[in-house]
Amino acid sequence: MTIQKKISDLFSAHYSNRALSIIKIQGDASSRQYFRVNGTTGTVIACYDPAFETLAPESYPFLLLHSLLSRHAIPVPALITIDSENGLLLLEDCGDLLLQNIFGSSREPNAPDLYREIIDILIQLQTIHGQKKQIPFSISFDHEKLMFEFDFFIQHGLLNYFSPVFNRQSAGQLRHEFETIAEILVKPKHFVLNHRDFHSRNILISHEKPVIIDFQDARMGLPQYDAVSLIRDSYVNLSPSLTEELKKYHYNGLCTHELTTMSLDEYLFYFDLMAFQRNIKAIGTFCYQTKVKKNTAFQHSISPTLSYLPEYINARKELKAAGKILQAILDDSAT
C-alpha cells in the first residue's frame, strides 16, 4: 500500500469523506515526507515519518514536544489525528509562507517587528522547564553532541566537498581546536530549552502570525543556540544593524525573564562561538546533502553560511587557530 493510500484512509476515517487530492510538498533534509491533503472541508498537512512506525506514541519525540509546546502556548500547528502503525500524522495546514519568503516581498518592511515577535516566542520557549529525566530536558548540546556535528563537518565538508582545496593533514589539528571550542560551549548552568533548528524555514507566517514547525529535536543548550539559528541564518542574511539589535533584544528578554546571569559582553562572546559552531554544523549538513545524498537544493546555502565565519574568527581569539586552518576554504568560497 502506498503512503498516499494510507494517508487517504486516515483522512477518510477522521473526516468521513474522501480526500480530493494528495500532493507531496517540499520537506527538509530528514527522512520525513509531507503532503497537502485537500478535502471538501479544506486542507490539512499529512506527515509520514518512518521513525514513528517503530515508536509508541508516548515515546515519539514529535508528540512529546507538540504537547509540551502547546501547553505553554507556543504557536505550533494543531494536531488533528495520528496513525502510529503507519507512521502518519495529520496536522493543521498553516500555509506555505515561510519567514524566509517575506524578504523581497511587500512584507519585508515589517521584518524587524516580525523578528522581535519571533524572539518573544523564543524567550517563551526558553522559559519552559521539565523533569531532567524526560525528553527534551534529558538531552543537551553536550560535548559529545557538539563534537559529532564538528566531526560531521570534517568528514562531509572538508574531506569530501572541499577536498580539492583543503589540506587533509590539517584535519587532526582542526579537530583539536574544535574540541577546545566545544569545551567552552558546554556550560550547563546556562542551559535552557532550545528548538534546535530555529531558522527562517521552520517558521511559517499564518494569518500574519508566526507558527513554529520542525521542533521534534529540541534539547537543552546555551540560549544563544536558537538565537544564532535565527539571526545568523543560512537562508536569510539580515542587515548588520538589525543583527545587532536582535542580539540585544534577545539578551534583554533573557534578563527580563531571569533566564541568564551573563553580562551583555559575555552573552555576545558565547553568541559568536555558538554561531561559529552552528554555522559549521549547517555547512556540514549542506555538503552531505550535496555530495552524498545528491540533493543539490542546499548547495547554494554553503557559500553564504561560510561568509559568516570570518566575522567570528576576527572577533574572538579562541577561534583564530581554527580560522587559520579553514582559510583555504574561506578564500575558495569568496572567489
Image (cartoon, rainbow, N blue to C red):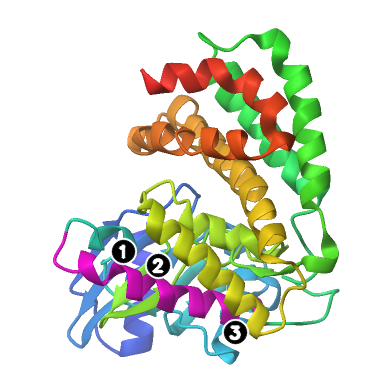
Q: Where is residue 152 in the image (x, y as percent from the top left)?
A: 65, 33
From the image, tell me which residue sits under label 1: 98
Magenta stretch: includes residue 16:
no
Q: What residue type is labelled 3?
A: Ser
Q: Is residue 201 visible?
A: no
Residue 290 vertical placement versus 10 (above, below): above
**Residue 252 horizontal side relative to residue 298, left or right:** right
Q: Mark 3 points at which residue?
A: 67
Estimate the spatial distance between the alpha carbons at disc 3 and disc 2, rounded to whole Å: 18 Å
Q: Give the residue displayed 21% in from the left and 75% down from the top.
A: 38
Q: Position of residue 180 (x, y in %)?
A: 82, 36
Residue 302 falls left or right of residue 316: left
Q: Please report the bounds of the magenta region as a residue range.
A: 105-127
Q: Which of marks 2 and 1 is nearer the N terminus?
A: 1
Residue receiving disc 2: 203
Mark 1 is surrounded, within 10 Å at the Cα level, by few (under 14), some (14 to 19) or many (20 or more) other residues, namely some
The answer to which quarter of the image holds residue 59 is: bottom right
Q: In terms of secondary structure, where does tag 1 sit?
A: loop
Q: Where is residue 300 in the image (x, y as percent from the top left)?
A: 34, 34
Q: How crowded is mark 3: few (under 14 residues within 10 Å), some or many (20 or more)?
A: few
Residue type at tag 2: Ile
Contact, CB < 8 Å: mark 2 with mark 1? yes
Q: What kind of element bears circle 3? A: helix
Residue at 60% over, 70% down: 251
Secondary structure at badge 2 equals: strand
